Every structure is written in C-alpha cells, then in structure tokens.
Image (cartoon, rainbow, N blue to C red):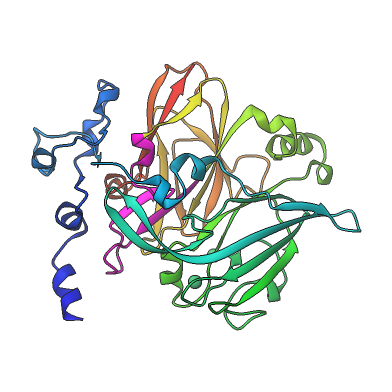
Amino acid sequence: MKIFERNTKKLSRRDFLKTALGGGVAITGLAGISTNKNVSAIPQGNVDLSTANHEDSHNDHGSPGTVGQVNHDANGFDPPSLLYEWDYGEVSQLPNGQTLREYHIAAVDKEIEIAPGVFFPAWTYNGRVPGPSLRCVEGDRIRIKFINAGSHPHTIHFHGIHPASMDGVPGVGAGVINPGEETIYEFDAFPFGCHLYHCHANPLKRHIHKGLYGAFVIDPDPARHQGEDAQIARQRNHLFPEVNNYNEMVMVMNGFDTNFDGDNEVYAANTIAFAYMKEPIKIQRDQTQRLYLINITEFDPINSFHVHANFFDYYDHGTTFQPTLKTVDTIMQCQAQRGILEFSFKDFEPGLYMFHAHQSEFAELGWMGFFEVVE
Ligand code: CU
Ligand code: CU
C-alpha cells in the first residue's frame, strides 16, 4: 500500500488537519479564549486560515474551531438530538407484570460529516454516531431486535448484567451476525446506571472506532430502594416528575481516524468537532444539570471532561446514589468508563462557560464546547 504510506506517514495529526481537509479546518491555541472575549470570539465560519495556521506565534492566539458548516440534514442527526434524544423502546407489559421494552437496531454503513468538509465512512447503529441513546428502568425486560444491514459482521455487546448467551461476542450465543442476518438480545436491565453498548466483532478496535457504539442508561426504580435512596431514584427515573428538575444530556466522547493510520485526527463529544462551540448548549441558570458522560475513544488510552468556572459531583458508572467524587472540575475516563455529572450554575453570571477534554490536543482537534448560561 505504497500510496497509502506516501500520503500519510509524513503528516502529523495537525499537519493532516491543516493541509488535507478541503473544508479548511483552522486550529489555533486554546489560550485565546479568555473571559475578556465576547461572543464574537466564537468562530462562525470565517476564521482566516492564513493567520490561523500560525499556531506557534504569540501574536496569534485566536479561537480554535472549524470553518464552514456541517450538513446535519445529510447526516440525519444533529448536535442537539444527540444531546437530548432518548430511545425508550416500544413499551408493553409481560404477563408477569414486568415492563417489556423492545428496541430496533440496524447496523448500516453510512458516510457522515464529522467536521465541515471532513467525511468519515462510518459503520452506524440506526444511521447515527453515536447510536440511539437507549433508556429503560432497572428490572425492565429489554429486547433488542438487531439486524445487520451493513457490509461486515457485527454484534451488539451491552455493558450490564445478562446471560452469557446474550453477551454479543464472537463464538458465544448468536456470535457474530453476518450481513443480512439478525438476532435478538434479551435480558433484564441491571444494574441501574450509565452504561453503553458497542459492537464486539473483530478486529475490535476497528469496529468500535468506525462508530458502532451508544449510550445505555438504566434508571433506578424507586420501588427497589428505601428511604433517601428511593427519593434520589425518583429524581433519576424518567417516569417520575422529579426528573424534570434536571436538564439531562448525553455526551459520548469519541474520536475519528480519518486516514486509517491508527491515530485519531478529529475528536468530539457527540461526533461533530466543535459542534457545541458553534452552537453553545443553552442551559437555564436555575436548573440542575445532569450529564451522562461516556468515553468510547479508540486508540487513545484515556479521555477527560473539564468544565470552566464551576465544579461538579461525579457518580462513577452511575451505579450509586451518592457521588463517588465531590466538587471536582475534571474527571478522566478510560475507554468504556462512564459516569453521571451533576452541576448547577445557580447564581452564576450568565454567559459562556467552556467545557472540553483536558488533553489539550483533543480540545484543539474538536473536543471543546460551551454552555451558555441564561437567566
Ligand atoms: Cu462491528
Ligand atoms: Cu465494552
């Protein structure tokens, strides 16, 4: 594969972004964002490449970002839908009274635009990267009808408790599902928490990195817990009104190896580089924020989340009612690690509050955004 080598081996990840991306991705320093800069500091499609490329110049510490717009309609998903949309399945009741949730997931090949002009030949669940954010309640019967409409063998492997035969790995149960084939994964949802699912076909890192992953959130069932725990369970369960006191978001931290050299060139929360910088996430100042955060980044050992000017409580894996970390502004996650962040901007000055990976390189390559706190 001489052509492949010639095209890629001498380019660093940054060089790749500067020279190879027709859409014109302009990367400059993080240092340019300060509290003195107003909203106009956010690039809206007019960053001048001729100056933006001087990233080592002390005279040019502008804003990072991308030039142009991603065609979200063509992608079939947009940054707000990835943040806020849940798939609760088709809900019915089994004869024993247990709630049954049936989900339909198809693996499909699909080219997606991950930054303006940067297209990635993804493998997707239901045409999305990440796949649908599945949500259910502790103890529900989960039935996933999986169809492989893609071009490679795939599976769905869920993190959670289930029988061996439902594990979605090669050689066990249904094993790998070949193109044109289908299977059903069925199990009871335990334990409550913030989980994920992903393809487990080999080569594993290629199948995951191509886009086959998604959030899987199991709400705690208040009836299964006592006292204060039951109260907290109500605040986390989408079937109870108490959950409306929270603004619930999903972010899946991911990366994309656009030239297939085993290294990511683009990073994001929810796939689209800098999406939440271009369109900051509006949050009501008085509403508590709850963020389901999952790291599925391939090729890099860890990813992280950092919020500016504020602190959060963290529930590792979301499997506890009390925070496992209190009052922190940065957490790190290895691949598949995940958790729930809770924070509030009550009484804060309205405005733009940045969040990003605290691997500065990831931030500069797309994993950076803003909360816009409004009264
Ligand atoms: Cu796969
Ligand atoms: Cu896994």
Location of residue 241 in the rendering, given as x and y in whole percent from the top left corner: 73, 30
Residue at the image position 74 percent from the left and 64 percent from the top:
187
Q: Is residue 262 left or right of residue 154?
A: left
| Residue projecting furthest to the bottom | 171
Seen from the viewer's position, the closer of residues 184 and 8 is 184
Location of residue 347 in the rendering, given as x and y in whole percent from the top left corner: 50, 16
Residue at the image position 44 percent from the left and 77 percent from the top:
203
Quarter of the image for residue 276 reads top left
Seen from the viewer's position, the closer of residues 163 and 320 is 163
Location of residue 275 in the rendering, given as x and y in whole percent from the top left corner: 37, 41
Q: Is residue 294 magenta?
A: no
Q: Is residue 95 above or below residue 66?
A: below
Seen from the viewer's position, the closer of residues 360 and 257 is 257
Q: Is residue 23 above or below residue 154?
A: above
Q: Is residue 265 magenta?
A: yes
Q: Is residue 347 above or below residue 9?
A: above
Residue at the image position 57 percent from the left and 79 percent from the top:
176
Q: Is residue 186 left or right of residue 226?
A: left
Quarter of the image for residue 237 reads top right
Residue 159 visible to an observer of this rendering = no
Q: Which residues are magenta?
A: 251-278
Location of residue 76 in the rendering, given as x and y in whole percent from the top left corner: 46, 50
Where the N terminus falls, by quadrant? bottom left
Residue 119 visible to an observer of this rendering = yes
Q: Is residue 275 left or right of residue 324?
A: left
Q: What is the tally of numbered marks visible in this picture?
A: 0
